[in-house]
Amino acid sequence: MKVSDLEFTRPYPFYKTYIDLLDDVDLVELLERQLKNFPQFIRSIPEGKMGYAYATGKWTVAEVLVHIIDSERVFQYRALRFARGDKTVLPGFDQDEYVPLSKAGNRSKESILEEYRAVRQSTIALFGNLEEEVLGYSGVASNLNWSVGALGLVICGHQRHHRNILRERYLRA
C-alpha cells in the first residue's frame, strides 16, 4: 500500500496530518527505511538533552521517544485485530496518562533505542506478511473507522511528526 492508495474520508481528520507528511512510498519500504534512519537520529541526540523539555508542562525528549514507541504498539495492535477480522470496537488511549507512567526519564538512550528497534521490527513483520487486500480491512478504534493500511501509514507519519518537533523545538535550543 502507498499513501496514494489510501482514500481519505471522514475517519481521518486529525490523523491525516501525519499521513500528509509522507512521500508516496510503499508502506513496508517506509517502515524499513525509518528503521534505518530513526535510530541514527536518536543516537545524534546529545545525552544531556534526553531530560530536556522546551517549556513547562511539555514532555522531555525521552518521553517523546517513548511516546512514539507506545503509540506504534497501540496502532500495531489495532492493525493486527482488524487484519484478523476482529470487529470489536476498540477504545482510544490517553497518551497524557501513558507518558508519566512510562518512566522514560529513568531510561537510558540505549534502552529506548533498543525498544524502538524491537517494536519496529515487529511492525515490519506484521505488515510485511499481510496480503494487499488485508490492508483494506477495517475496524473501529477511538470512535473512528480505520483501515489496516491507514494504521500502518499513521505509524510512519506519527514518528515523522514527532521527529520534526524534536528537531524544531527541542534540539535547536
Image (tube, rainbow, N blue to C red):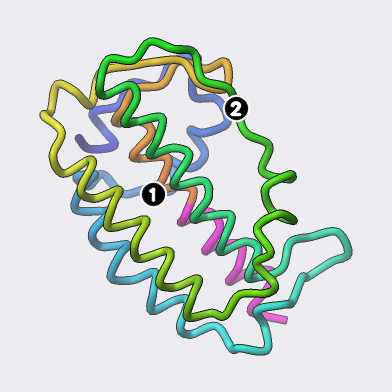
- 156 to 169, vertically: above or below: above
State the residue position of label 2: 92
For marks 1 and 2 on the same chain, the one whose residue lies earlier in the sequence: 2
Identify the residue at horizontal 48%, vertical 42% (top origin): 18
How crowded is the residue under tag 1: few (<14 C-alpha within 10 Å), some, or many (20+)?
many
Q: In terms of depth relative to the viewer, which is nearer, 58 or 19?
A: 58
The tag on residue 171 is none
Please tell me whether residue 40 is drawn above or below residue 147 in the rendered image: below
Q: Is residue 128 above or below residue 164?
A: above
When the figure is inspected, residue 158 is found, relative to residue 151, above or below; the finding is below
The picture places residue 41, in percent across and down from the top left corner, at 44, 76
Q: Residue 78 lies in magenta, yes or no? A: no
Main structural element of the magenta stretch: helix, strand or loop? helix
Amino acid under label 2? Answer: Gly
**Where, by quadrant of the figure, is residue 58 drawn?**
bottom right
Rate crowding at label 2 as few (under 14), some (14 to 19) or many (20 or more) other CA atoms within 10 Å: few
Q: Position of residue 60 (x, y in %)?
A: 71, 68
Element type at marker 1? Answer: helix
**Image quadrant where one finds the N terminus:** top left
Residue at 78% of width from left, 70% of height from top? Answer: 54
Q: Which residue is pictured at 22% across the width and 40% down the height?
A: 127
Residue 121, percent across and down? Answer: 27, 57
Q: Is residue 106 left or right of residue 148?
A: right
- Tag 1 residue: 156
Highlighted magenta segment, given as a residue range: 159-173
As measured in the structure, the alpha-carbon distance from the residue carrying label 1 to the one carrying label 2 is: 19 Å
Could you say which quadrant of the image residue 36 lies in? Answer: bottom left
The three-letter amino acid code for the residue at tag 1 is: Cys
Residue 161 lies in the magenta-colored region = yes
Place of residue 17 in the rendered image (x, y in percent of width and height, measured from the top left): 52, 39
